[in-house]
Amino acid sequence: MGDALAGKVGLIGLAVPVLVGASAVLYALSALGAYLSVRERRWNRYSAWAAQGAWVAHTVALLGGALFGGRWTVWSAAPGAMLLVTWLAASSYQVSDALLREAGKRLGPRGQDGPGPQMAPTGLGLFLFPAIAVGLVLADVVAGWASGGLIAGPDRSVLEESWVPVHAILAATGWGLFTLAWVANLMYTTQDRSLRKLRLGPLSRLLPSLEVLDRVGLRLVVAGLLFLVAGLIPGIARAVSLWGATWFADPKVISTFLAVLAYAFHLVARVRLGWTARRASWVLNVGFILTAVNLLVATPLLSRFHQWL
Amino acid sequence: MTARLLVAGLNHRTAPVEVREKVAVPGWRLKATLRDLQEACGGEVVILSTCNRAEVYAVTDQSLPDCSCPPRGEPAALVARLAGTDDSGAPPAAEALLQHVYAYCDAEAVSHLYRVASGLDSMVLGETEILGQVKDLYEAACAAGTAGPTLHALFQGALRVGARARTETNISANAVSVPYVALGLARKVFADLSGRNALLIGTGDIGRVALRHLVEAGLGGIVAANRTLERAEEALSSLDVGTSVRCRAADLTALPQLLASSDIVVACSEAPHYILGPADLKAAAPRRRHPLLLIDLGVPRQIDPALGAREDVYLFNLDDLEGAVQANIEERRREAVKVERMVAEEVERFEAARRRKMAAPVIRHFRARAETIRTEEVERALGDLGPVSPRDRELLEAFSRRLTNRILDLPTVTLRELVAQRDGTAVLDVVGRVLHGELAVRRETRERREEADLSRDPPAGLHGTTKANGEVKGNG
C-alpha cells in the first residue's frame, strides 16, 4: 500500500514538470496565434484553443502539485508558488478576455463604413502569454536545480504551520495581479503609441480603448496591493515571533516591500497627484521588475527563510 | 427542363442616379412587384433594391434569356418591371434601360450576389449596410412567398458569405471617411462616448456636418460654440437633436470654461490664426484627470500643434485623418483579395450542392428502373419455380432487394460525387443517355417478344434470353 502510494507520488512528480512544460509550450503557441490573428482572424480561434489547452494542463499540474506535495506544492516551494502566480494570471485572462470582448462588442463603433460589431479578440493573450510561458519555464528550471541539489533546503518545519498556505496563496495572488497590471500597462502604452502615430492597424483595432485599459490596470494594482498586504500580515507576525528584529534583513522581504512601495506610489501618483496613465507607466515597469526579481531571483537564490527548495 | 438562375439589374457603376431612381422599388410596392415578376418568370423571385442597385434574382424553368454582355432585351424587360407603371399605366421602355442593365446566369449569378453581400460590389468597398439590406429583402420575398428552394439556398449562402467576410477578414474593419476615422479615434481613447462631452468650435458648413456626426455618435453633451451666439443657435436648431444628447450653444468668450468640461474638441472655424493653444488649455485645466481629444478640421489650422506634445492630449489635424483614411482604403483593398477567394470557394460549394440536386432525378430514375427489373425478375423466377411457401417468397424478395441495393449503392454514391465536381453535369448527360439507351433496348426487346408471342408460344428459356440481352445492352 505504502509502495503503491509512493509510486503514485513519484509518477505525479514526473508528470507535473511535463505538464508545466506542455502548458508553457501551449501558452507560447497561443501567443503566436494571437500575433498571427492580427492579420488573419482565423488564427484567433487556434490561439483560443491553445490557451484553453494550456490552462487545462496548467490546472492539472497545479492540482497534482498541491495534492501530492514536493517542490510543486504552491505554499511551500518556489516552483509551486510560480505555478500558482502564473495560473492566477492565466485564469484572470479567461475572465478579463471575456469582459473585454463584451465591452468591445458593446462599445464597438457602428456606421455605414465604420467598423462592425466584430471586435471580439482583445489581444490580451498576445501580451500576457509570453510572460506566463517564461514564468513556467523558469519554474521548471528552478525545480530542476532543486532536484539536482544545487540549492540547500531551509528549516522546513515552519512550512508545516497552518498560516503558511494563507500567507503564500494571498501573496501569490497579489503578485499575479501585479503581473496582469503590468500587462495591461503594456497594452496601454502600445495603444497610446498607435494612436499618437496614427498607426491604426489590426493591432490597434484588437486592443480595447485607452480608458478601459487604464481602468483595468488601476483596479488590478489596487486588488494586487490588497491581496499582497493581506498575505504579508500573517507572515510578518510569525517572522517577528520567530526571528525578532532581524526578520526584515532578507532580500525577499526587502524586494517585496520595495514592490509594495512602487505600486503604492503608483496609486498615489494616479489618484492624488493627477498623473496620467502614460506618465505613471514607468512606475508600473519598476514594480514589475521588482516583482520579477522577487519571484525569480530573491526567492530561489537569495532569501534566508523563503528558500523553499 | 432544368431550373436555372438569373440575375438582371443595374447599379451605381452601370446607371446614373436618374435611371436608378426610376427602377427603385419602395417598400410599399415591393410585394406587388415581387408577385408581378413571379408571374412573368414563372418561378422564384427576389428583388434587391437599394440606393445603389436594383436587381431581380429569378429561378425559372423557361428558356433563359441571353446572358451575354451586353444582354438582349429580356433582362432589361425584367428590370423595367421593377418600375411599376408610369402615369400612362405603362412600364418604362426596356430599350431605355438596355445600355445600363447587366445579367448573369447560374454560377455567375451566384458569384455576383455573393460579391454584393460581402461588400465587394459596393460604392464604398466593404461597407456593412448592404448585408442587412440583402437580409431584409430576402425576408420580404419569403413573406411574399416568391422565394423557393433555390433562392433560399442562394440567399442563405449569400448571408453566410457576407458574415464570413466581415468576421474572418478586415474588409469592414477600418473607417474610410474622415468623420468615421475621427469617431473611431474617439472610441479608441474613451470607453463609452455616452458619458463624454464634446465642444464644437465653429458652426459653418463643415461645423454643421461635424455637429450631425457628433449627435449621431451618442455623446453625453455637445456644446456648439461660435464667435456669434446666434450662429451657433441657428446651427443647433437646424438639426433634429434627440433628447438623449444634451446640446447647447455658446459663444467663444467662454472658451476656458468650455474646455475644462470637454473631453473632445472639434475645431472647424475659419479663423486665420490658432484659437486654441497651450496657454488656453493650461488656464482651463492645469491638470486633467482624463485625456483630451482634439480634432482640428480647419484650414488654416485652428489648434496649435504644440498641444500635441502634452501627454494628456491627442491632437489630429485634417491631413492626419485623410492619411488614415487612405491607409484604411488600402487595407480594405488588400482584404478584398481574401474575400474574393472566399466568394469563389462559396460559389463552388453552392454549385456543387446544386449539381448534386440535379443528379437526384437521374438517380431516382435509375433506382426505379432497377426496382422494376427486380420485381419482374422475381416474378419470373417465382413463375419458373412453381408453388413456393410464403416464407420462401419472402426470402427471395429480401434477397433480390439486398442484391439490388448492394449493386446500386456504389454507383449511386459515385454518381453524386462525380456530378458535384466542377464539370460533373457532363456525367449526367452520359448517364442519362445510358439509361435511355437501356430503356430503348428493353422497349425494343419487349416489342419483339410480344410479336413473337403473337406468332407462337414462347419456349421455356426465352424469358432468360431476353433478360440477358436487355441487361447486357443496357449496361453497355
Image (cartoon, helix red, strand yellow):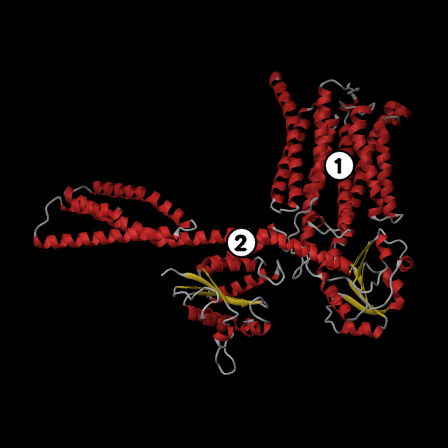
Please report contact status of discs 2 and 1: CB closer than 8 Å, yes or no. no
Q: Position of residue A149 (x, y in %)?
A: 74, 17
Which of these two is toward me, B70 or B175? B70
Q: Which residue is mark 1?
A: A176
Q: Which residue is mark 2?
A: B343
Q: Position of residue B317 (x, y in %)?
A: 79, 59
Image quarter hosting the C terminus of chain A: top right
The image's mark for residue B465 is none
Q: Position of residue B34 (x, y in %)?
A: 48, 69
Q: Tell me the crowding category of disc 1: few under 14, some 14 to 19, or many 20 or more residues within 10 angstroms, Cα based.
A: many
- Write the residue at 82% across / 24% down: A302
Mark 1 chain: A
Determine whether the residue tagged by mark 1 lies in a helix, strand or loop.
Answer: helix
Name above or below for residue B233 compared with residue B198: below
Residue at mark 2 shares a chain with residue at mark 1:
no
2 or 1: mark nearer the eye: 2
Which of these two is toward me, B170 or B36? B170
Residue B460 as seen in the image, left or right of residue B118: left
Name above or below for residue B460 compared with residue B225: above
What amino acid is labelled 2 in the image? Val
- Write the residue at 64% across / 37% down: A29
Determine whether the residue tagged by mark 2 lies in a helix, strand or loop.
Answer: helix
Q: Quadrant of residue B291?
A: bottom right
In the displayed image of the protein, which residue is found farthest to the front?
Answer: B70
- Write the residue at 34% across / 51% down: B363
Which of these two is toward me, A265 or A242? A265
